[in-house]
């Protein structure tokens, strides 16, 4: 069936010659006041056009003329014959926003769909809208429509009717790329994609859309440029009013927008537009973590736990889908502070983080490089570091990439404000500028600032708050597992080229290198390599390499052990030279008191190692002068096998002022806190305090520093044993220092002749006959002498002739007052 609805070229197809002859004879002349039917001399097209006007004028007020067609013809509407029209500019801005081609009322009707053919191979479908200002025979397009169809003003085009097959061409889902129409009108406000989709369907309902079509969309008083990216046909079950079938729908190139179509917005590439809501695509994003990163390949070992914590705090929000992060209202971490001893991998880790992330090459800045002698230049250098990130944030908004800035030696430029001696205040203004850039009024969300320092105590507090250097991570000395990783990293090439001898056991080396930093382990490997290469260098008048033997070069266990004992010593480890001088004569166990002291010391060592409730154990060894307190303290420390042993002795602080002495003592304790297990021997406390009985005089500054440090517990996970020695327990009691120690152990002098003879036997200085003579003289007598003083008297006696040694020794005992029976 065909329904005559409007006078146009459609009649040329419908009114056949046979039908027009029928109309000539059958059409009553009284039906229309118009002229009679056209004469037969008119051409077919002319007669059809005349009849179309006649029939439309006569019949449209009353009814539609229905023409019967043979049953074999399709029931679809027959397209009108193409007609030539002229392209024109859209008359008003309001009409440009309708996405319709604008025509004269004389040519077409509003809501009709037409095909515009610009070239034999290029056709475009539009929905038309009529407007009185458009001349007949012209069709007006907006600028986006002309760009899409490649039209120019005044171009002649073919226009024909287009009818949709609603069973196949209704739009089920349409993906549209969206961006601000004008770049200068961009803003960072979020736009609700759900409201945007509802407004879009309301504005463009029952309109034709094609893939790649361009249009302008007005929403919230902003103009957006849209491009149709993809369209799916609507499920036929929905069209029938049934539940969705769930089948994958066919892609279509041309479709009709209906009320229940789904519109999905996709942000254009490099757009600064922010979309929220569910009516937007899941953004295809590149993972921020490089998929093939590996710590050992990157040369980092022993920092698995530290990196796990950094990843959790700093990168988890950047790896998670932006939609979920956006819904949580989560902001990314902007700053990481890495601190710890030198050589533990802070700088290396910061550099490799940039390689691990799919981000731009990090900007690495040494702190002192920022400073400039000219006024304002230091602050300008800070601003330059952030300029690129600021520009990209303004241009791309949330799509901006991650910018990493690494500050090495951060303490050089970010000291506490107000502490500088300079009157210029350069450091203060640099800190102010950095504070405002990291988290100021204009916040950047596309930066990650990594700072590194050995002295976190010097850095301004305002930098340490959340929002700036929020993640503070100590990169400490590696544990045994970490040392295995580091040694494997530095020996892997030798192993691959068979230059590492089979007797080299990496696990054994890791066990032997307690408290070695990563840099010191690298130095150990380098020293072992040098030792091995030195074996193959000919020691002649010229330096030559024995090539025959060099081909068989291998680094052996002996090379590593030699370097371990002679070349590389840990800065935060046990320096045997510190305490070996105190026990060079060994420990003389002249009686039960010495054994009890060593046993008690062993118990305190085990308590420090095993107890989680007492991470700090402090013991005071007190006794008369020359009783061997320092030697016993050094022996307990040595037997503990702690990785860090340090002796804080007055002989290393001769001439120091009170402040420098406090700083030296504090440094010993700070170094101890960096090790898992540490032992600090505070020797001769009254000398450290500058105590003299005349006055009496002592240093209150050093006293207060010691009191604080003796009571201060080590950081979590660290354990510290403090062994103090003093000859003036009464003085420490008056200073209230005894309360700072967990326990006190008394070290007595040798008090009986039998103990003295046992000491002589252990020392082996006298012959058996001489010892028997001395024992006879001292039998049953009381003596009072320290073991250190006894050693001096023995050595003096041994300088005499053999016949006079015993006599001289007994004489010296009486002179020293050690033989108490002589005075009783």
Image (cartoon, helix red, strand yellow):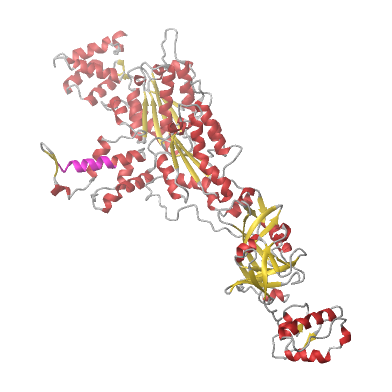
Query: Of residues 425 and 142, which is closer to you in this image?
Result: 142
Magenta region, main secondary structure: helix
For the question of whether residue 565 can be seen, the reply is yes
Instruction: Identify the residue at the far left of this view.
Output: 541
Q: Measuring 86% from the left and 78% from the top, which residue is drawn there? A: 61
User: Where residue 275 appears, x then y in whole percent?
Assistant: 63, 54
Query: Of residues 562 and 526, which is closer to you in this image?
Result: 526
User: Where residue 595 appears, x then y in whole percent?
Assistant: 34, 29
Q: Measuring 74% from the left and 77% from the top, which residue is drawn there? A: 8
Would you identify the image quadrant in which residue 234 lies?
Answer: bottom right
Query: Of residues 341 and 395, which is closer to you in this image?
Result: 395
User: Where residue 817 appears, x then y in whole percent?
Assistant: 30, 11
In this rendering, the answer to whether 314 lies above or below 423 is: below
Quadrant placement of the C terminus: top left
Q: Measuring 84% from the left and 82% from the top, which residue is drawn there? A: 35
Quadrant placement of the N terminus: bottom right
For the question of whether residue 745 can be seen, the reply is no
Instruction: Identify the residue at the far right of this view.
Output: 30
| Residue 518 in magenta stretch | no
User: Where residue 509 appears, x then y in whole percent?
Assistant: 30, 44
Left or right of 723 in this view: 768: left
In this rendering, the answer to whether 66 lies above or below 660 is: below
Q: Total of numbered circles in the picture? A: 0
Q: What range is drawn magenta here? A: 525-537
Left or right of 319 in this view: 259: right
């Amino acid at each position: 069936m065909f329904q005559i609805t409007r006078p146009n070229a459609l009649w040329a197809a419908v009114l056949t010659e046979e039908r027009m002859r029928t109309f000539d004879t059958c059409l009553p002349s009284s039906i229309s006041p118009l002229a009679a039917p056209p004469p037969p001399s008119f051409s077919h097209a002319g007669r059809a056009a005349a009849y179309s006007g006649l029939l439309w004028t006569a019949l449209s007020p009353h009814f539609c003329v229905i023409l019967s067609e043979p049953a074999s013809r399709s029931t679809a509407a027959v397209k009108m014959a193409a007609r030539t029209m002229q392209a024109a500019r859209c008359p008003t801005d309001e009409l440009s926003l309708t996405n319709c081609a604008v025509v004269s009322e004389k040519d077409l009707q509003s809501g009709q769909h037409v095909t515009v053919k610009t070239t034999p191979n290029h056709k475009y479908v539009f929905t038309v809208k009529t407007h009185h200002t458009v001349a007949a025979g012209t069709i007006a397009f907006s600028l986006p429509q002309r760009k899409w169809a490649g039209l120019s003003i005044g171009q002649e085009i073919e226009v024909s009717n287009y009818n949709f097959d609603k069973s196949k061409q209704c739009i089920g889902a349409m993906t549209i790329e969206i961006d601000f129409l004008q770049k200068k009108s961009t803003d960072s406000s979020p736009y609700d994609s759900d409201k945007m989709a509802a407004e879009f369907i309301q504005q463009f309902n029952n309109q034709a859309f094609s893939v790649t079509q361009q249009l302008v969309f007005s929403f919230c008083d902003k103009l957006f440029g849209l491009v149709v990216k993809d369209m799916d046909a609507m499920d036929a079950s929905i069209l029938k009013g049934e539940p969705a079938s769930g089948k994958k729908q066919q892609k279509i190139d041309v479709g009709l927008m209906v009320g229940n179509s789904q519109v999905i917005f996709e942000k254009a590439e490099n757009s600064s537009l922010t979309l929220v809501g569910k009516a937007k695509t899941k953004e295809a994003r590149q993972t921020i973590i490089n998929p093939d990163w590996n710590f050992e390949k990157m040369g980092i070992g022993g920092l698995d736990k530290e990196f796990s914590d950094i990843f959790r705090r700093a990168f988890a929000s950047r790896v998670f889908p932006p939609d979920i992060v956006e819904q949580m209202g989560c902001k990314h971490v902007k700053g990481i502070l890495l601190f710890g001893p030198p050589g533990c991998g802070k700088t290396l880790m910061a550099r490799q983080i940039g390689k691990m992330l799919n981000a731009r090459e990090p900007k690495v800045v040494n702190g002192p490089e920022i400073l400039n002698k000219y006024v304002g230049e230091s602050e300008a250098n800070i601003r330059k570091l952030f300029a690129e990130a600021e520009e990209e944030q303004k241009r791309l908004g949330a799509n901006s990439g991650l910018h990493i800035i690494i500050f090495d030696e951060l303490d050089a430029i970010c000291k506490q404000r107000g502490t500088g001696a300079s009157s210029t205040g350069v450091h203060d203004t640099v800190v102010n500028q950095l504070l405002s850039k990291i988290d100021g009024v204009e916040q950047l969300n596309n930066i990650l600032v990594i700072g590194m320092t050995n002295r976190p105590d010097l850095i301004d507090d305002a930098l340490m708050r959340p929002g700036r250097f929020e993640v503070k991570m100590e990169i400490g000395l590696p544990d045994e597992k970490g040392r295995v990783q580091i040694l494997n990293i530095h020996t892997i090439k030798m192993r691959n080229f068979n230059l590492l001898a089979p007797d080299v056991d990496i696990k054994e080396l890791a066990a032997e290198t307690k408290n070695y930093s990563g840099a010191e382990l690298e130095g150990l490997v380098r020293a072992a390599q040098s030792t091995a290469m030195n074996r193959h260098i000919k020691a002649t008048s010229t330096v030559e390499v024995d090539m025959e033997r060099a081909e068989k070069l291998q680094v052996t266990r002996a090379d590593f052990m030699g370097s371990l004992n002679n070349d590389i010593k840990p800065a935060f480890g046990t320096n045997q030279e510190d305490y070996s001088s105190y026990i060079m004569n060994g420990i003389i166990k002249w009686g039960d008191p010495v054994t009890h002291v060593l046993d008690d010391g062993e118990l305190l060592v085990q308590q420090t190692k095993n107890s989680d409730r007492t991470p700090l154990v402090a013991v005071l060894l007190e006794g008369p002068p020359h009783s061997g307190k320092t030697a016993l303290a050094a022996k307990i420390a040595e037997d503990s096998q702690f990785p860090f042993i340090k002796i804080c002795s007055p002989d290393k602080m001769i001439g120091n002022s009170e402040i420098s002495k406090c700083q030296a003592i504090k440094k010993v304790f700070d170094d101890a806190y960096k090790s898992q297990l540490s032992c600090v021997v505070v020797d001769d406390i009254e000398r450290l305090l500058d105590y003299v009985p005349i006055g009496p005089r002592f240093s209150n500054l050093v006293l207060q520093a010691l009191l604080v440090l003796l009571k201060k517990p080590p950081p979590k996970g660290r354990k510290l044993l403090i062994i103090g020695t003093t000859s003036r327990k009464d003085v420490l009691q008056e200073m209230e220092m005894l309360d700072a120690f967990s326990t006190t152990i008394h070290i007595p002098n040798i008090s009986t002749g039998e103990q003295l003879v046992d000491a002589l036997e252990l020392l082996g200085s006298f012959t058996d006959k001489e010892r028997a003579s001395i024992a006879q003289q001292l039998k049953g007598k009381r003596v009072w002498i320290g073991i250190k003083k006894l050693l001096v008297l023995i050595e003096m006696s041994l300088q005499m002739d053999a016949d006079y040694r015993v006599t001289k020794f007994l004489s010296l005992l009486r002179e020293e007052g050690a033989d108490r029976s002589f005075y009783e």
